[in-house]
Image (spheres, helix red, strand yellow):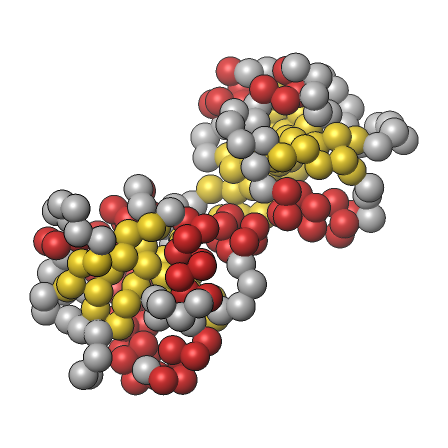
Amino acid sequence: MSQDLRIALTKGRLQDKSVELFEAMGLDCSPIKDPGRRLIHKVPNYPLEAVLAKAPDVITYVEHGVCDLGIVGKDTILEHGKSFYEVLDLGFGKCRFALAVKKGSDFYGTYKTRRVASKYPNVTRAFFEKKGMDVDIIKIEGSVELAPILDLADGIVDIVETGVTLRENGLVPIEDVAQVSARLIVNTASMKLHKAQIEDFIGRCEAELAKRREQA
């Protein structure tokens, strides 16, 4: 293994869980855990460099081949993903996309075009296209729960973990849109150019995940 692979990690909770996985695989992640101002972090005992990035940028780096691999949530893949291999469900960062509405409202019981607010317009569009429904999608950057409260939208499509934020704002999930968890993605050209190295890394991930499943 001559050349280091480069992996883009999603900052935040997925980064922490990724590091936890790598350490269980025997990788020394001390440079990633104490990054300072450095932007690329070398793993001392394995031919791997880590880049810490925002979720959409992880996909951009992998698609353009400046990173060979990436760890990113399925939510970001569904919204932004185009051309790469999705090779492994890492099993952490679990949540779901759900359609939520004001408690007591009948989202489906009308013939008018529904307005749906979301940070994820592509996911929302694909969901309703499958149903053959025509909806007006409103892109929201901040707290999407505000849209139904302010009567800007009839419903929202958003990530739901516990549902507490929805309940506290008088909203209820009425339908699951998609299940979400962290995924390992690989650049298509890298898979050919560095096949042995990438397969070794995937194999190590799979072995640790299998061990976790046995212990669960």
- Indicate the quadrant containing the N terminus: top left, top right, bottom left or bottom right: bottom left
* Position of residue 44 in the picture relative to residue 150 (left or right): left
Q: Determine the residue positioned at 54% across, 19% down.
A: 167
Is 174 rendered above or below residue 212?
A: above
Nearer the observer, 31 or 214: 31
Q: Is 79 above or below relative to 159? A: below
Q: Is residue 111 visible?
A: yes
Residue 177 versus residue 31 in the image, above or below: above
Q: Residue furthest right?
A: 111
Q: Residue at x 79, y 31 (%)?
A: 114
Q: How far across and how far down the image is residue 24, in percent?
A: 18, 59
Residue sitting at x 54%, y 54%: 80
46 relative to 155 in the view: left or right: left
| Image-quadrant location for residue 186 | bottom left
Q: Is residue 110 found left or right of 185 in the rendered image?
A: right
Q: Quadrant of residue 58?
A: bottom left
**Image coordinates for residue 121, horizontal then vertical, percent:** 64, 42
Residue 207 in sight here: no
Question: Which is nearer the eye, 16 or 139?
Answer: 139
User: Residue 148 in the image: x percent, y percent?
Assistant: 66, 20
User: How many marks do you count on the picture?
Assistant: 0
Q: Position of residue 45 (x, y in %)?
A: 10, 69
* Residue in the picture at 52% in, 37% down: 159
Q: In the displayed structure, would residue 177 be above or below residue 161?
A: below
31 to the left or right of 130? left
